[in-house]
Image (cartoon, rainbow, N blue to C red):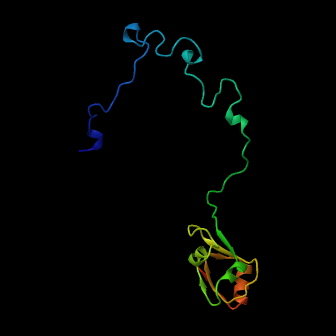
Amino acid sequence: MQLNELGPSIGSTKSSRRVGRGDGSGRGTFSGRGSKGQKGHHKGVRPGFEGGQLALIKRLPRKRGFTNIFKVEFNVVNVGSLNAFPDGAEITPKEMCEAGLIRSLNRPTKILGRGDMEKSLTVSADKFSVAAEEKIRAAQGTVKKA
């Protein structure tokens, strides 16, 4: 049996209300629109119309430009803050999160080059700036891109 061959179930369809078919129908004369006025004479007003008052959409400042929906937000960690870890440690985003350097593991992590590297560390992250890579390698550390 095909879905398009099924007839309507009992009570699944409801006929539209027939207005303007005489007073005996209960929906005659004004056809449920009340007496006179803007809503009685025609279909009403457009969405956002406020009776002639300057509409909310026109009172708000215009938003310029656009929002890039493909923008990637990174957890940013500077090289100088990695000195909090012991010498020779292997640092991953999970360790950085536990140490309070980043807030969540849902975003990719990027290491930036601000500060000086004083310890030899193995740093694993999604991205590194050129300066950060140079400082980590200069301190005899290693860089792993996750």
Residue 96, horizontal then vertical, whole percent: 61, 76
Which quarter of the picture shows residue 138?
A: bottom right
| Along the viewing direction, whichever of 47 and 85 lies nearer the viewer | 85
Give the left or right position of residue 28, taking residue 129 as reference.
Answer: left
- Identity of the residue furthest to the left in this view: 1
* Left or right, 75 with reference to 15: right
Residue at 60 percent of width and 70 percent of height = 108
Q: Position of residue 20 (x, y in %)?
A: 44, 13
**Up/down of 39 relative to 73, above or below:** above
Where residue 120 sits in the image (x, y, percent)? 67, 90
Report the front residue among 68 and 113.
Answer: 113
Give the image quarter of residue 21: top left
Quadrant housing residue 25: top left
Give the residue drawn at x 60%, y 24%.
Answer: 45
Residue found 46% across the figure and 14% down from its top: 31
Q: Is residue 52 above or below residue 130?
A: above
Q: Please indicate whether residue 22 sits to the left or right of residue 9 in the image.
A: right
